[in-house]
Amino acid sequence: MGSTSTSSSSKISCFQCEETSSSFDHFRNGWRLRSGEFAQLCPRCASIYEEGKFCEAFHSNDDGWRDCESCGKLVHCGCIVSFNAYLLLDFGGVICMECSRINFALARSRCLFLEGQPDITRQTVIEPQYRPRSSEMEVQQISRNFECVVTPLFEKLLSATDADLKLARLIIPKKCAEAFFPDISEPRGFLLKIQDTEGKDWDFNYRYWINGGSKMYILEGLRDFMISKRWQAGDTVTFYRVEPGGKLIIGLRKTSSLQPPNEK
């Protein structure tokens, strides 16, 4: 890489391509150098830098490229040019500044929305095994997809019965169903539209039957969804709610290496 320099004839060189000019106005400021001065760039290199594509254009074969943990975009880490283009995450990895700003805005919106709102996930007493364990990064990514506030409601580790393609149904924990799903008055139930975490709509049949004098809630018609998501015993299904509006979202976390519980 070149360096900003002045020749005996008072010509100035572009920091990157070393194009020269005797007019200082021909150049534009780039990044700040360790000396405190700014790298002087010719119009072409300056335009690439200002578009945020400098490292892609000139450093593509260098080491130090890492994936943004949120969007997957490649970020050139350890380079002075892209020093302000990413943040280090507490749990390891990096996040690009664009995702960081979006996540901050979504988190702020979520806090403002939930301020003064009852926290039904805490008010509702559900068994520990059904409490949502979605990471903040997962929730932020889903919020980005829907451009709104998303709240995890509950999750369930899939049993062998839940993963049976012939049955193609999911038993919803009773307290979770009564707290988070629409009210249901008829055993035959009704069609319930739920979106997956990519925004695709799915139509399931939500119903109940009486078992030992108590209602057992069932989500049926899951065969296509199960095949699409490669749903299997040991995976974890999580339900979320979009605010405002209350739309339900279903997500799947692949944890098939875990031992599935016995169906009760």
Image (cartoon, helix red, strand yellow):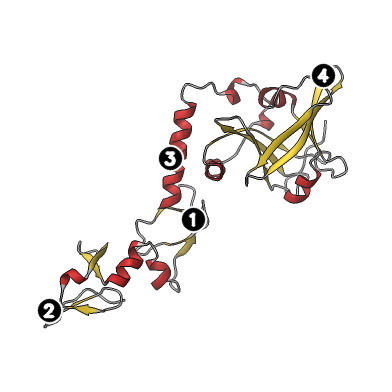
Q: Residues within 10 Å of mark 3 (few under 14, many from 20)?
A: few
Q: Amino acid at mark 4?
A: Ser
Residue type beneath disc 2: Ser
Give the mark, 2 or 3, whose residue is nearer the N terminus: 2
Q: Residue at x 15, y 81 (%)?
A: 7
Whole-Å distance between the Cαs marked 2 and 4? 89 Å
Front disc: 2 or 4: 2
Residue 64 position by quadrant:
bottom left
Task: Label 2: state its secondary structure.
Answer: loop
Residue at horizontal 41 percent and vertical 62 percent from the top: 77
The secondary element bearing badge 4 is classed as strand
Pick whichever of labels 2 and 1 is earlier in the sequence: 2
Disc 2/disc 3 C-alpha distance (Å): 48 Å
Which tag, 1 or 4, sits closer to the chain's start? 1
Asked whether, in this view, residue 161 is left or right of residue 35, the answer is: right
Q: Is 10 rendered above or below residue 260? A: below
Q: Which residue is mark 1?
A: 68
Residue under label 3, please give it: 105
Dot 2 corresponds to which residue? 10
Are the residues tagged 3 and 1 within 8 Å (C-beta)? Answer: no
Q: Nearer the viewer, mark 3 or mark 4?
A: 3
Q: Are marks 2 and 4 in contact (CB under 8 Å)?
A: no
Residue designated by label 4: 214
Separation of residues labelled 3 and 1 (CA atoms): 18 Å
Q: Is residue 73 above or below residue 5?
A: above
Label 4 near label 3: C-beta < 8 Å? no
Q: Quadrant of the N terminus?
A: bottom left
In the rendered image, which quarter is residue 42 located in?
bottom left
